Image: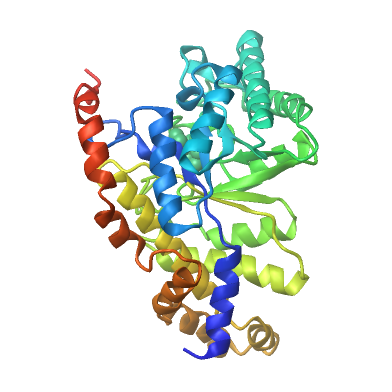
Amino acid sequence: MDVRKSEQIFDALGTFRIELPSWGFANTGTRFGKFIQPAAATTTEEKFSDAGQVHLLTGVCPTVALHVLWDCPDGVHSTDDIKKFAGRHGVLPGSINPNLFQDQEYKYGSFGNPDPAVRQRALQHTKDSIEIARRLHSRDVSMWFADGSNYPGTANIRQRKQWFKEVLKESHGELSPGQRLLIEYKPFEPAFYHTDIADWGMALLLARAAGPQARVLVDTGHHYAAQNIEQIVAWLLSEEMLGGFHFNDRRYADDDLTMGSIDPYQVFRIFHEIRYFEWETGKRADIAYMIDQSHNLKGKIEAMIQTVTVAQELFSKAALVDARELAAAQKNCDLVRAESLLQDAFATDVRPVIQEWRESKGLPKNPMEAFRQSGYLERITKERAARNSSNISSYA
Ligand code: PSV
Ligand code: MN
């Protein structure tokens, strides 16, 4: 590879960071059950420890996303413990995810619940989550709602939209100046007739209604199979409303498969749109890249290292698209030339340069190999196996 391309990759990797999800290190499954892993994290501290390993070996995952109900059992009072875990394990708390779907009260929704007492409870939990974020110096509070309905005629869709606007606005009012409210959309599941925030347009309207510090979060698994996600990304970029990503891959619906495992070209095209926007506008897109994956079958830490490695590869490939040539080809309607610029970049083997970059940063050339040789997995398997064997895998 010529020097200029290597430099482009070095520059791109220098800016690329991706956040790990705490829940990706714990035992999780499908709605048919869980396959328990002896090395899975059983406490918040163990999640920090595992995330710390991924960061130690890859150097690009300095933060871990927290889910309030799962990771902060004492709410705002958990923040002192979290700070200790962060200090011990070398990763900082990242986005804070309120949990507005698990409690029994949310059976008919949270921000869209017809009962004002439940909406109030959901608002209070969001305010507490914003306070947690403030204490932990986390910038983003990331909102995903399971709200919706299962049968036609059972919910007043327009009324619920109004409630969402009101409660989001109130939540936004709690933010400190540097903080952001990210609004995630999803077409279905757990609701199977209508979901209150089903797509990017709804999320965009609600983010605008919430206030100037709200942005849209794109979870790549939350689209119908044929949807053009990079077009959604391009539109949100041009509206300056793209706040972040939850990366994962899927073949059918929200399958939680490893990023790039089914359609790596899709991720490449997303990264390309972001880089093309930055080149054209001269602005840096302020986007939080996050992983949102739970691995039922793969070893959890290995799966995260694999994900991060793939993310770096696809980001590097996108950095090889010559934006100037692309703009000229588009202007001249030179279709084959324009398309080839993407295809050639995607086909480039960027792995040797990424290895050089890692060495230049004092990181292991091959993080997966380094992990396998570190003895970490053997140690935690011994420490955690007994606790994990008593974990419940069935819903009966
Ligand atoms: C919902 O499917 C989702 O993508 C949301 O981001 C949740 O916070 C996350 O998964 C974990 O359940
Ligand atoms: Mn998500």
Q: Position of residue 68 (x, y in %)?
A: 53, 26
Of residues 207 and 29, which is closer to you in this image?
29
Q: Is residue 306 above or below residue 12?
A: above
Identify which residue, 309 or 137, lies in the foreground. 137
Quarter assignment of residue 349? bottom left
Q: Is residue 377 above or below residue 327?
A: above
Query: What residue is shown at x 33% (from left), y 47% (from top)?
Result: 301
Q: Position of residue 10 (x, y in %)?
A: 55, 74
Of all residues shown, which one is farthest toward the top? 117
Q: Is residue 131 left or right of residue 22?
A: right
Using the rendered image of the protein, determine whether residue 75 is visible from the camera's viewpoint.
yes
Drawn side of residue 383 relative to residue 258, left or right: left
In which quadrant will I find the C terminus? top left
Count the numbered circles shown.
0
At 44% from the left edge and 58% from the top edge, which residue is drawn? 58
Q: As drawn, is 224 to the left or to the right of 272? A: left
Asked if residue 226 shows in the view, the reply is no
Q: At 73% from the left edge and 38% from the top edge, which residue is drawn?
A: 179
Against 343, residue 358 (above or below) is above
Q: Residue at x 47, y 31 (%)?
A: 193
The quadrant where residue 387 appears: top left
Front-most of residues 101 and 275: 275
Q: Position of residue 209 (x, y in %)?
A: 77, 36
**Could you tell me residue 318's position as x and y percent?**
54, 73
